[in-house]
Image (cartoon, grey):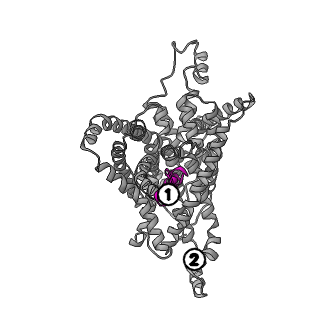
Amino acid sequence: MWQASSVLIALGVLAPVVSLIWLALGADWAHWKHLVQYVLPDAALNTAMLMGGVGVLTLVVGTGCAWLVSAHDFPGRKLLHWALLLPLAMPAYIVAFAYLDLLHPIGPVQGALRWMLGYSSPREWRLPDLRSMGGAIFVLGFVLYPYVYMTARAMFMTQPAHLMEAARMLGESRWGAFRRVALPMARPALAVGLSLALLETLNDIGASEFLGVNTLTVSVYTTWITRTDLAGAAQIACSMLLVVIALVWLERHARRHQRYGSAQRMRAIQPERLHGAKAWLATLFTALPVLIGFIAPAAYLCWETYKRLSQGQGVSTGLWMSLGNTLTLALGVTVVTVIAGLIIAWATRNGVSTRHPSRWQARVATLGYAIPGTVLAIGLLTPALALDGGIARLLNLTGLPLMALGVILVVACSIRFLVIPVGGIESGLQRIPSTLEQASRLLGETAFGTLLRVHLPLLKPAVATSALLVFVDAMKELPATLLLRPANFDTLATWLYAEAARGTYEEGAVAALLIVVAGLLPVVLLAKTQLQPTTQTLENPQD
């Protein structure tokens, strides 16, 4: 039963991809011709430029910050080593929303700069327009660099100090030792972090649209919603799948060599104390990403919320309803996703190699996270509507009950975030000795009873962590929610999207602040579990 349920879930994850390809190939040839001539060149070029710019910025900022806090000691390092994760709590569309107001020609930042420089009007002096490719790279780069920082920091923390010392003894400068020893060893981790940042860039729709950059994701949305051309949207989505496959290959290829940089039972790198100008430059370099990616937009949201509440305007009924819808959706996605993850992890547990064919469903079930929300929504629509129509006819109902109740949206979000509980619960199960299950079965307990009475109590931390991460991700999800939500159903993310599209920021700031506060929970969790300082010294077994 467990295997059959696990296989069914994996087939459910595959269904949108198969449906998408079928939909794209079944379209008229004229669609392809129009797409190749007028849509794909511009959208593909913009996407490539955006991903290239974001890739370079995240690599420089993430790797530089990770190396500075790992190998050097400077003022503020203990605070900054975890504060550098804070932009993870900020969805890119919220940062874009905040900076559009902050950096407006008549906004507070440019007004202050003109006052300092002696100018009186935006016609005399103004910053470059944020609604541009450069602006999109700036926003996405400073929001997504923590993916590179996190993986690079974990790698630098485990690199043995004697390799760097050997390089220095052979005459290398500190920069040379970093470039020729530490950096090559960290390449697999950097590639993993970079691929995650690029997948998020490809998935983004809010920030790119706010900033006027027509990427493949934006093209899928406008082709479907504005031009009501589902076949054309499916064809663009298929081209995005090629990019996703390339990024997943990059991540998997890099992970094959991830153990290259590990060195168990070796003395870790001890931070070197910096003095004078070097120390303050290091503080500035590591503080700037936190200021741009979190503090400035968060302060703006807090100020706008305070202004609204202090003026007695309060929070509208619509926003309260959006908050209720968001919590309901996130709760439903969390329950479905954790149960599905538990089934898959339990069905593929114990003593089976991660490369064993019987674990294919676990690998397939985790593919959803790599598929952008817009692509997933288009692929899911056709099979979901067919099922919805069948249920309506069977029960003699009018309309589409699954779509109207938000069930299809819950399914889409569950497919996208299934990787979180599968990975978390699998890791938890690997820490439980198989002898416990054997003893339980010898005493006559069934597999379900063993899971219920033996494993679940021990899996509580893994299940709770997975549930928290899924809940927060579902609250922030914008592309799939925008495309598959029922009529007159707004979440905080779609409410903010609508406010920003209309250019009214007042209530949008309140919705954005609520999303950011929720997003802080997993960041605190990550800081506690993933980035503990490596102050301990482990003895070499040969000593």
Q: In this rendering, would 446 be left or right of 133?
A: right
Residue 543 found in image quarter: bottom right
Q: Measuring from the top left, give residue 145's x and y in whole percent.
A: 51, 43
Mark 2–mark 1 Cα distance, whole angstroms, equals 37 Å
Residue 530 seen in the figure: no
Of the pair 153 and 272, the residue shown nearer to us: 153
Q: Give neighbour class at mark 2: few <14, some 14-19, many 20+ (Cα, 10 Å).
A: few
The residue that label 1 is drawn on is: 396
Residue 42 found in image quarter: top left
Residue type, mark 2 in image: Phe
Above or below residue 441? Residue 272 is above
Marking on residue 448: 2
Of the pair 395 and 82, the residue shown nearer to us: 395
Q: Measuring from the top left, give residue 295's x and y in whole percent.
A: 62, 37
Q: Which residues are magenta?
A: 391-416
**Chief secondary structure of the magenta span?**
helix
**CB contact under 8 Å: marks 2 and 1:** no
Instruction: Identify the residue at image location x=49%, y=28%.
Output: 130
Residue type, mark 1 in image: Asn
Closer mark to the observer between disc 2 and disc 1: 1
Residue 419 seen in the figure: yes
Above or below residue 27? Residue 5 is below
Q: Secondary structure at mark 1?
A: loop
Residue 113 found in image quarter: top right
Q: Measuring from the top left, give residue 166's x and y in whole percent.
A: 47, 55
Q: Give neighbour class at mark 1: few <14, some 14-19, many 20+ (Cα, 10 Å).
A: few
Q: In the displayed orientation, state which residue is furthest to the front.
A: 396
Q: Measuring from the top left, give residue 403's x and y in whole percent.
A: 50, 51
Q: Earlier in the sequence, mark 2 or mark 1?
A: 1
Instruction: Identify the residue at image location x=63%, y=61%.
Output: 464
Above or below residue 37? Residue 474 is below
Any magenta on residue 400?
A: yes
